Image (cartoon, helix red, strand yellow):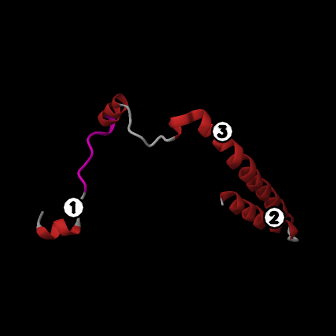
Amino acid sequence: MISSAGIVLATTFAALTVMPLAYLVHIGAIVAIGVVLDTLVVRLFLVPALVTDLGPTVWWPAMLPSDVAAALHRLIGPRSPAPATSQQRLRGR
């Protein structure tokens, strides 16, 4: 699905290469080539290879180790309480 969207986007930019304005021809060709490289090389080969190499590290929004969490707590401070909702304000908390 993503690869087909990249091909469609590259084709759209390649359509600029038939324009009579020279700068649009250059921009269209460069962007179309970049999108094709991104679609066919980066997304099909490099991303899966990096995911395989990095393993579970790829899924970084996980729980922080306790020492890192403690350092962030010292640096930022405790979390502030959530603001009151409109219903809590109407009830007077």
Q: Which mark is residue 49?
A: 3
Q: Earlier in the sequence, mark 1 or mark 3?
A: 3
Residue at (63, 38) in percent of width and height? 50
Q: Is residue 78 highlighted in magenta?
A: yes
Instruction: Give the percent coordinates (x, y) of residue 2.
Output: 66, 58
Q: Quadrant of the C terminus?
A: bottom left
Left or right placement of residue 91 versus residue 44 in this view: left
Among the 4 quarters of the image, the one containing residue 24: bottom right
The mark nearer the N terminus, 2 or 3, is 2
* Region of the chain picked out in magenta, as a range: 75-82
Q: Amino acid at mark 1?
A: Ala
SS assignment at label 2: helix
Between the residue at mark 1 and the residue at mark 3, the CA separation in whole angstroms equals 46 Å
SS class, disc 3: helix
Return the residue nearer the eye: 59 or 72: 59
Residue 8 % position (x, y): 74, 65
The earlier-in-sequence mark between 1 and 2 is 2
Could you tell me if the residues under marks 1 and 3 are in contact, i.e. CB atoms within 8 Å?
Answer: no
Identify which residue is drawn at 57% across, 34% down. Answer: 54
The residue drawn where x is 87% and y is 69% is 18
Give the residue at mark 2. Answer: 14
Q: Which residue is mark 1?
A: 84
- Within 10 Å of disc 3 (Cα), the crowding (few <14, some 14-19, many 20+) is few
